Amino acid sequence: MSEEAPKKKIIFSGIQPTGVPTLGNYIGALRNWAAMQDDYRCVYCIVDQHALTVRQDPAQFRKQILNSYALMMACGVDPEKSVYYIQSHVPAHAQLSWILSCYTQFGELSRMTQFKDKSAKHPENVNAGLFTYPVLMAADILLYQADLVPVGEDQKQHVEICRDIANRFNGIYGNVFTIPEPYIPKREQGARIMSLTDPARKMSKSDENPNGYISILDPPETILRKFKRAVTDSDGEICYREGKDGINNLLAIYSVLTGQTIAQAEEAFSGKGYGYLKEQVGSVTAETLRPIQEEYSRLTADRAYLEQCIRTGAEKAASISARTLAKVSKKIGLI
Ligand code: TYM
């Protein structure tokens, strides 16, 4: 009797189309998206509706959504291998989000650190969407019955609340949703790439100081310059150790991009100065991003192809998500 091949696990992940992704997004998440495509059934999404929690300029936003879609493809997302689409093109996300919001407590949403951080940072626009953001994220993940969710460390709490909502729902209605696991690299493998100007904070594209982050589309000379200015410490020793946030960050970036372990990287830099380390990390980064930037230019020049991929992606996503939404609707008694 022939044995059936084990069923591939399902991956879901998303990225907001706000600005150009950073080296942090790339190392913490995007590079894993591409790498997982052969071993898993992957569903990847440009989460444009999540980005509406911050006021967007419509013309600019339209461009950014299309460019983000192209950029993920340049980073290796293959729309032939994966289901790759734009969130707002699949209405099931918003529909399931409403239903799940009725199974989510005010108190648990109030505890989300991202909500607390963002509302403290933008007290002028603490909108309800910012508050229910994790529910839409839970809908994204649960619609596709994902087993694993590759994200950076900052999204761990959101995957945890998604699990709580799914468990609560399953507890009432039976096994409707697969309970997803977060898939987060280790710290030294880039789960949290830090700002170059303030290594106690994560690298973020919303940083007011552009020297704090490397954008995936920064030209090589900008990358080298930003690394040259990276904040380190004054003890002069290149090793990965508690309290050396700046150096730890540079070593983590170097190690991930070269495929060396931290120990090998420490060995390679032993006896060398910080200037040399910064130069090497800068050039490895520039070399890694060069082919991505070239592919991005090629793709953005082929709008017809992009639009075709976007359409096909939405059709595939709609057909998968419709099954889950129908099951949920039936369970809760909608007719
Ligand atoms: P977003 O768009 O902020 O970031 C996309 C991915 O990049 C990771 N990331 C980082 N990793 C390491 N170091 C950093 N400095 C760094 N900055 C960002 C993020 O953890 C994320 O994995 N809410 C999500 C988008 C989303 C989503 C989803 C993700 C919506 N629905 C469903 C997974 C599953 C977000 O805003 O990511």
Image: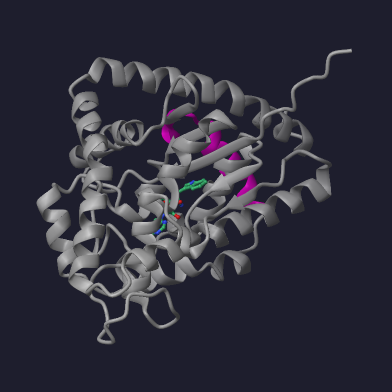
Q: Quadrant of residue 160?
A: bottom right
Q: Which residues are magenta?
A: 86-103
Residue 30 higher or lower than 213, as above or below: above
Corner quadrant of residue 270: bottom left
| Foreground residue among 254 and 149 | 254
> Would you identify the image quadrant in which residue 54 lies?
bottom left
Residue 214: percent from left, percent from top: 23, 56
Residue 118 rendering spot, x and y as whole percentages: 38, 67
How many tags in the picture? 0
Residue under the image location 31 percent in, 19 percent down: 307
Instruction: Tell me the residue at 17%/55% (across/down).
Output: 223
Query: Which residue, as the protein is rendered here, is positioned at the far top?
Result: 1
**Residue 213, above or below 96:** below
The reply, left or right, for residue 96 in relation to residue 229 is: right
Residue 74 % position (x, y): 31, 32
Can residue 315 be seen here?
yes
